[in-house]
Amino acid sequence: MITSSWPDLEKKYLMFNIKRPPMVIVKGEGVRLWDQTGRSYLDFVGGWAVNALGHCHPAVVNAIQQQAATLIHTSNQYYTIPQIELGRLLVENSALDKVFLCNSGAEANEGAVKLARKYGKVKKNGAYEVITTLKSFHGRTLAMVAATGKPHYQEPYKPLPAGFLNVPYNDLEAIKQATNERTIAIMIEPVQGEGGVNVATQEYMHGLRKWCDENGLLLMLDEVQTGIGRTGKLFAYQHYGIEPDIMTLAKALGGGVSIGALLSKQHCAVFEPGDHGSTFGGNPLACAAGVAVMNEVLHNDISGRAAATGEYLVKRLGELKEKHPIITEVRGLGLLCAFDISKEVAGDIMLRCSEEGLLINMVSPTTIRLMPPLIITENNVDEAIDILDEVLSEF
Ligand SMILES: *Cc1c(COP(=O)(O)O)cnc(C)c1O
């Protein structure tokens, strides 16, 4: 049943956590979404970088349908095949050796910090501090709020769990200054997503790897947003020719089904039975979706497509910048892109674009982020640029 009062009912029954544009999304296919009135939208939000293969990709739908009719859940008390298959795909296609499956990005990062703390207990005199960066985003659990270097996310929840230091991004000296005998790990996004698409420099990533090696620290990469092809490589660390000790994944991995993964090198895979767990983590349904996503991404060079289309998108955004002086900077790696504007009107631009049939995301009043499905074509990019062009001329 479709009723125009869904937003009113939402207001009545759900907590008010996010402001939304007025339409109610009822269907998705490929790079498009439809609202209850039948209007379609070109989706450059992609479920916050989740829908890498677009909406309702047949391979994902089929895998979920088959698995749902076979076995949805058993708990981790038993071996199940999709979990092992997904673990193998992740290990064989990354530099990491071992996988723990969970349900979300925050949960994967929590696991990463617990793994680092256990490693500190057994291998580094109880060291436990994790250095993270300002403008980072690592999730919404209490510990990840402490890890996330955004004071306005932290303020309402103090006191926060101890053991996190937030220092400026792309600043190796700041990491060195913050390191002390309590430090066990450095946790970094290779590209800060929520922070506005800030790309780590080559020198920074190489410097971090070297600093971690020299000081016995773990380099933990939060690839929750950058993983699974988003930046033009399967994993963003592959742009740098370095390898992390620990990596976390989530967003695109399940094709829209909630899943998270914590990956570790053998030398720091120190969990023993009983140390960590999850009721739903690694359940057959989510893992079947993950296996379908991984196979689709690997067999169709989705990462390579993202690299090429991303380059085209950044080039077209550069042209828009020439034409519209309100755009002050364009950034991107693969299909994780953003542009800054000189006035605090990102919210208005987002709303106007949705009225014109284009969905975009704002990460601050002066920054707009684009993270479309990785299957978009250059024609889809042109369509989005035409709408942005028209809307920006109003500002
Ligand atoms: C989205 C995101 C998270 C949090 O993931 P959830 O699934 O929302 O818990 C963590 N880290 C990064 C880099 C993210 O983009």
Image (tube, rainbow, N blue to C red):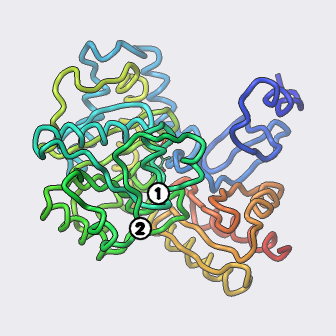
Give the answer, above or below, for where 113 lies relative to 184: above
Three-letter code for the amino acid on which mark 2 is drawn: Tyr
Label 1: how many residues lie within 10 Å, few (<14), some (14-19) or many (20+)? many
- Choose between 208 and 302: the one closer to the eye: 208
* Residue 155 % position (x, y): 58, 47
- Choose between 329 and 110: the one closer to the eye: 110
The answer to the question of whether label 2 and label 1 lie on touching residues, with beta carbons closer than 8 A, is yes
Quarter of the image that includes the C terminus:
bottom right
- Choose between 330 and 43: the one closer to the eye: 330
Q: To which quarter of the image does residue 280 belong?
A: top left
Q: Secondary structure at mark 2?
A: loop
Residue at 56% in and 57% down? 371
Residue at 38% in and 19% down? 279
Left or right? Give the position of 128 relative to 123: right
Give the answer, above or below, for where 337 lies relative to 84: below
Three-letter code for the amino acid on which mark 1 is drawn: Ser
The residue that disc 2 covers is 169
Give the answer, above or below, for where 163 lies relative to 13: below
Q: Which mark is residue 126?
A: none
* Residue 100 % position (x, y): 28, 33
Give the answer, above or below, for where 296 lies relative to 381: above
Q: Which mark is residue 136?
A: 1
